[in-house]
Amino acid sequence: MTILAYGINHKTADISLRERIAFSASEIQSALTRLIGSEKNINEAAILSTCNRTEVYCATTQSHENAVKNWLASDRQIIQYELDQASYTLWEKDAASHIMRVASGLDSQIVGEPQIMGQVKTAYELARAAGTLGTELNVLSDLSLRVAKRIRTETEIGNHPVSIAYAAVTMAQQIFTDIKKTRVLLIGAGKTIELVATHMQSAGVKSVDIANRTISNAARIALKTGGSALKLSQINEKLHRYDIVISSTGSTLPILGKGAVEKACRQRRHKPIFMVDIAVPRDIEPEVQTLSDVYLYSIDDLTEVIDENISNRTKAAEKAEQLIHEGTLSYEKELRVRSSQDLMSRLREGAGRQRDAEVAKALLRIESGSNPEQVI
């Protein structure tokens, strides 16, 4: 048996194919049961399915390479030719190297993104719960997650934000010693604001208030963040309550003026406010940055940070690739050790059988009257 990795990702397939072949978390265990049940030559299996990839990892032999391909096409009702055009097949050390790169974020759309390691871990846990994670995949799972943790610890691959939303939250963490204790207001209800809200929650912020022109859209996001929904007309009177304000709307005119922010600073007794204006045109008057108690950043400021951080991540990725190489060598060594152990076990079993056979023949000769010393 050997490890096979088969699948598609954001590099090989567009979203229209990826979404058709994807598995939800609730589907994976039953899918694994179907795979193992229908393909007798596949002893172990795990499925990793995210917005950017769907990959099947299994223990099988190279003579049964098409089994996984055929099953996936059939299960997802995809024409085999269409799947073949976008898929890749990796064996043994190449499969091991690949899953290590995936788990560490080196194979992600945004290099170094942190969510993927947890998604890989969950994929293994779902396989274990389904009873499809055996000796081969256990070795691979332990090693790949261990290498991914080393990369997170020993390189700066994930230390530099490379998305507008993540950069905004990271900068806020640099200004406030404990962001968990801050009060946050997000203005707008688009995808960027939703992503900022998600990052805020990941950073430990307990509640995030949402202000938007359409109150129902604000309420939809606030329900997820544990905060309150506000109308845009309520911002000025409540602005002094917030330590962090991040805005991204489609308004053609500023939503926050210098006067309103200055008043809020006085009410806060000059306790600092961190503001990020992601909108174009801007939501916050540029003159606000002249206030001594306000840290105001525009989308251009964040873009400069992101460009620099992409460069930093590229450098960190070089060191990470070395750790991947070391991890692959460790995997190969583990396979050799296990192969040697199997060989020794077979030798011992063979020697034991030969011994028992010789003893049985000797006993028969002794029972038939032969001289015991000569028999021995």
Image (spheres, rainbow, N blue to C red):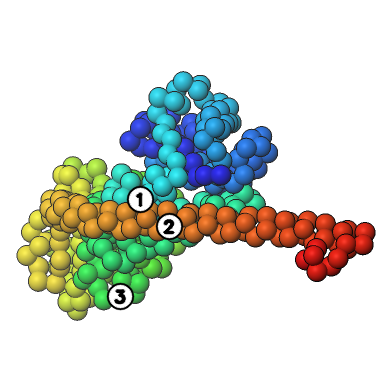
- Which numbered mark, 2 or 1, is in the foreground of this view? 2
> Where in the figure is residue 353, as x and y percent of width and height?
73, 56
- Mark drawn on residue 101: 1
> Where in the figure is residue 30, as x and y percent of width and height?
64, 43
Above or below residue 297? Residue 5 is above
Looking at marks 2 and 3 on the same chain, the residue that comes earlier in the sequence is marked by 3
Q: Is residue 24 left or right of residue 243?
A: right
Q: CA distance from mark 3 to mark 1?
A: 32 Å
Q: Residue at x 53, y 29 (%)?
A: 66
- Which numbered mark, 3 or 1, is in the foreground of this view? 1
Q: Nearer the viewer, residue 64 or 376?
A: 376
Q: Nearer the viewer, residue 258 or 112?
A: 112
Q: Is residue 347 left or right of residue 156?
A: right
Farthest residue in the bottom direction? 269
Above or below residue 107? Residue 139 is below
Residue 317 appears in the figure: yes
The reply to whether the C-beta atoms of the residues labelled 3 and 1 are less than 8 Å apart is: no
Query: The residue under label 3 is which amino acid type?
Result: Asp
Residue 193 appears in the figure: no
* Quadrant assignment for the N terminus: top right
Residue 60: name its quadrant.
Answer: top right
Q: Which residue is mark 2?
A: 333
Q: Residue at x 29, y 48 (%)?
A: 110
- Mark drawn on residue 178: 3
Q: Residue at x 42, y 53 (%)?
A: 332
